[in-house]
Image (cartoon, helix red, strand yellow):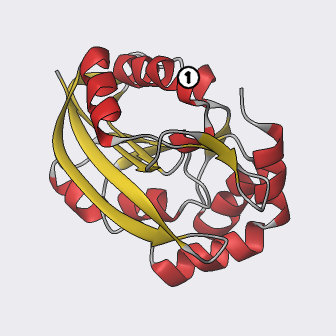
Amino acid sequence: MADRETIEAYAANIEKYRNLVTKQGGNSRLEGFLERLQPGAAILDLGCGVGDSAARMRDAGFTVSCMDASPDMAAMAREQHGLDVEVTSFDELAAKAAYDAVWASFSLLHAARAEMPANLSRIHRALRPGGMFYMGLKTGMHEARDAAGRFYAYFGEDELVAMLGTAGFTPVAIEEDSIVGLLGHPEACIHITSRLD
C-alpha cells in the first residue's frame, strides 16, 4: 500500500519536482539500460513519476506501460508527455510474463524495507524469461522520513544482491554515485541492473 504522507508530499511539491527532473535531464542510466533490450521491447516504468524516462523510452521506439501511486505524478505525466499512467501501488502489480524489462528509478525506496522481497517477487513474475530489471535506490540500512515528509527505505549493496538472487535475478551492472534531490543536498545512491534467471 502506498504511503499517504509520501503521496501528499509529492502533491505539495509537484511543480518543484517537475522542474528538478527537467533541469537534471532524467536518469543518466536509462540509455545504457535500453541498449540491453531488443528494439520495440515492452517496458514497465514502475513508479514513473512525472514521466520523463517513460517518454524517452517511448520516443526511442519501445512499448511503455506506466504505473505510479501518486495521482498528481500521473496527471503531470499525462499533461507533459501524453502518457497513460495507471495509478496503483507496488503491491498491486499483478502482471505475469508481460514485460521484457522493468525500470524502477528511485521508486521502490518509498516502500518499507520489509516489503522489498515481495516487490522483487512481483517484478520477477511480471517479466518474461531473460527480462531486464533496473532499480535505483539510496544507500543505507534504515528507514526514515525526509523534511518534506516522504518515507524512504535505504539499502546496502550486499543485501540487495542477496535479495535479488533469492528473487531469481542476476546483477549484471552495479554502480554507486550520489544525486541531488528535491531537498537540494547530495545523497549516496546505488544503481543495479539485473537479468531474470
Farthest-out residue, bottom:
23
Q: Residue at x 62, y 61 (%)?
A: 50
121 relative position to 48: left or right: left
In the rendered image of this protein, does residue 151 appear above or below residue 146?
above
Q: Residues within 10 Å of mark 1 (few under 14, many from 20)?
A: some
Q: Residue at x 61, y 30 (%)?
A: 112
The picture places residue 7, in percent across and down from the top left corner, at: 78, 47
Q: Nearer the viewer, residue 99 or 105?
A: 105
In the rendered image of this protein, does residue 185 appear above or below residue 107?
below
Residue 167 showing in the rendered view: yes
Q: Nearer the viewer, residue 185 or 36?
A: 185
Q: Nearer the viewer, residue 163 or 22?
A: 163
In the rendered image of this protein, does residue 156 appear above or below residue 177?
above
Residue 37 showing in the rendered view: no
**In the rendered image, which quarter contains the C terminus?**
top left
**In the rendered image, which quarter contains the N terminus?**
top right
Circle 1: residue type: Glu
In the rendered image of this protein, does residue 8 appear above or below residue 143?
below
60 relative position to 188: left or right: left
Q: Which residue is mark 1?
A: 115
Q: Residue at x 25, y 44 (%)?
A: 193
Q: Residue at x 73, y 51 (%)?
A: 150
The picture places residue 40, in percent across and down from the top left corner, at: 26, 47
User: Which quadrant would residue 170 be assigned to in this image?
Assistant: top left
User: Which quadrant would residue 156 be assigned to in this image?
Assistant: top left
The picture places residue 64, in percent across and down from the top left corner, at: 43, 46
Number of numbered labels in the structure image: 1
Farthest-out residue, front:
141
Task: Give SS at disc 1.
Answer: helix
10 relative position to 182: left or right: right
